[in-house]
Amino acid sequence: SIIMRRSTTGNILATLPQEVLFQITFFLDVLPLLRVKSINKNFNILCAKDEAGWVNLCLQLWKGKIFVDEALQQPPFITAYQLTTQEAITRQHIHKNEFCFDPVSEKGTIWNFRFKDAAGPDWTSWDPWWNEKEPRQMIFLPNGTVQSYLSCGQDHSDVVGNPQVTGHVLRNGAIRMDIPVRMTWRFSERPMDLPQRPIGSYVRIAVGGRDVPTYVIRRSPTENWGFLAESCWGVYTSFKMPKRKKNVLSLKKSSNANLELNCAEEKTDANILECEDSFVVTNEVQWREALLYNFGALILPEGVNATEDFNRMFGQTVQNRPITTVQTAGEAVIATGNEDNGNTNNNSVNNNNG
């Protein structure tokens, strides 16, 4: 009977002119359109055409998405739909033109930043996001420098007329300004304790000439096709980070289990990015880099032999630490973790120096 109904439907639709059929399929979602496409060979051809509704479906899919590869936004749009969806899932590294802000065209990514709870109260206490204000905005320039970004409408009183601050007023009224403590950035292929990945997977940021723990690039769990750059102490988002809610104060005091439950009640972007459990790069993953930073290292080691070299220097101190593996969108990030009677302590290495 299923075959008969399928055949009958195909016969009815087969009598319609293409233009009329396209008027029908235009209003179909992806799965219903694919079902019609599977009726027979004729419909397989017709429903693969752009006029069948794939242009509209692509526009709906890409609406509100942060990064959609322009090279993939080409006809046939049934292929564009497939490729852009697949790329958003499988590509966990960022291209330089996506990562940077171009000071000439004044276009590019404006990153939002906040400290993680693991950074400790010395840093979260003055962080704007933790004080329920708009998060700090930063831009990474192609020349390897980092600047602060003040949107039009933000308080510019501490910048305008201040001879110690070099600011550049943009055409949209925003200001990009040098940071009092110089910051630079570079891509890294193989940081210590992390697997080798394509260029654009790891970012090394130096503050005042000192490398801070590596920022790991991955797609945002908010499913907006944006990117996160996170280390054990901080997180950047390639899109506007929602302000911290007042009720997070009470959530923070609850147990990890209750925190997970409260975050799962409503999967909003704000809740996802507020919950520390949404992040995968912890002190257990980056304890070696955190330790070296707190010891005053200027440049953190990287490369195939970095972990082995570290173990030779600090072998007696770090022996008997179990292996911790965390999974990020199909990519394994492997590191050595802490052992505390089987319990994990994300605050085992605090950010004591910036």
Image: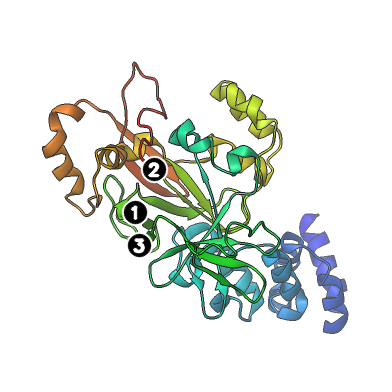
237 with respect to 231 (left or right)? right
47 with respect to 211 (left or right)? right
Quarter assignment of residue 73: bottom right
Local crowd size for mark 1, using a 10 Å CA cut-off: few (<14), some (14–19), many (≥20) = some
Decide if residue 243 is in sight here: yes
Residue at the far top: name it: 341
Local crowd size for mark 2, using a 10 Å CA cut-off: few (<14), some (14–19), many (≥20) = few
Please say if the residues under marks 1 and 2 sit with CB atoms less than 8 Å apart.
Answer: yes
Assign a secondary structure to mark 2. loop
Residue 64 in picture, x, y percent from top left: 69, 62
- Amino acid marked by disc 2: Gly
Residue found at x 13% / y 28%: 316
Residue found at x 36% / y 27%: 348
Please say if the residues under marks 2 and 3 sit with CB atoms less than 8 Å apart.
Answer: no
Q: Which tag, 2 or 3, sits closer to the chain's start? A: 3
Q: What number is the disc on residue 354?
A: 2
Residue found at x 61% / y 49%: 222
Query: From the image, which quarter does the C terminus lie in?
Result: top left
Q: What number is the disc on residue 208?
A: 1
Residue mark closest to the camera, 1 vs 3: 1
276 with respect to 152 (left or right)? left
For the residues labelled 1 and 2, the Cα–Cα distance comes to 10 Å
Assign a secondary structure to mark 1. loop
- 55 shown above or below 251: below
Q: Mark 3 points at which residue?
A: 187
68 with respect to 201 (left or right)? right
For the residues labelled 2 and 3, the Cα–Cα distance comes to 21 Å
Assign a secondary structure to mark 3. strand
Q: Of 153 and 309, which appears nearest the observer?
A: 153
Residue 281 in picture, x, y percent from top left: 42, 42
